[in-house]
Amino acid sequence: MILNEDLLIISVKPEYAIKILKGEKTIELRKCAPKKVGKNGYLLIYVTAPIKELWGIYKIEDIIKENPPTLCGITLEVKLESLS
């Protein structure tokens, strides 16, 4: 059973939602980290106008809370790993 505290809903522009669904975009950066949901929670993807629909539900693997310079290093490492 999925409880409300296990759900995080984010709004995403259609072009990024398509990349998420194709697996081309695997990291989502946000200004504020979620407070209630954590690892093993679920992420609902709401696609903004003109579509205005829920497009997917994903299991959250990890939430990284870091300052921007550190996050840039982490995302670069993930990108390089995916290329090899």
Image: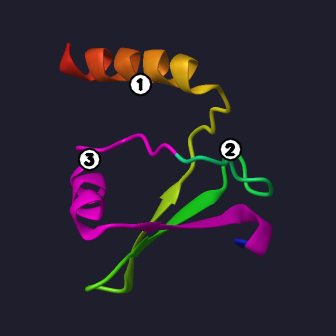
In the rendered image, residue 77, in percent from the top left (x then y), is placed at 38, 15
Q: Residue at x 68, y 32 (%)?
A: 65
The first of marks 1 and 2 along the sequence is: 2
Snapshot quadrant of residue 73: top left
Report how far apart the C-alphas of labels 3 and 1 lie in the structure: 15 Å
The amino acid beneath tag 1 is Thr
Q: Which residue was labeled with disc 2?
A: 39
In the rendered image, residue 42, in percent from the top left (x then y), is placed at 60, 60
Of residues 25 and 71, the one drawn nearer to the viewer in this rendering:
71
Of residues 69 and 33, the one drawn nearer to the viewer in this rendering:
69
Badge 3 vs badge 2, beta-carbon distance below 8 Å? no
Was residue 37 drawn as part of the magenta stretch in this picture?
no
Q: Residue at x 32, y 67 (%)?
A: 13
Q: Is residue 19 left or right of residue 73?
A: left
The first of marks 3 and 1 along the sequence is: 3
Was residue 27 drawn as part of the magenta stretch in this picture?
yes
Q: Is residue 6 left or right of residue 75?
A: right
The amino acid beneath tag 2 is Lys
Q: Magenta stretch: give its range.
A: 4-29
Q: Which residue was labeled with disc 3?
A: 23
Q: Which quadrant of the figure contains the C terminus?
A: top left
Report how far apart the C-alphas of labels 1 and 2 lie in the structure: 18 Å
Q: Is residue 24 left or right of residue 2?
A: left
Labelled disc at residue 75: 1
The answer to whether 31 is drawn above or below residue 70 in the figure is below
The answer to whether 64 is drawn above or below residue 54 in the figure is above
Q: Residue at x 30, y 44 (%)?
A: 25
Label 3 secondary element:
loop
Label 2 secondary element:
loop
The answer to whether 61 is drawn above or below residue 74 in the figure is below
Of residues 27 and 4, the one drawn nearer to the viewer in this rendering:
27
**Is residue 6 visible in the rendered structure shown here?**
yes
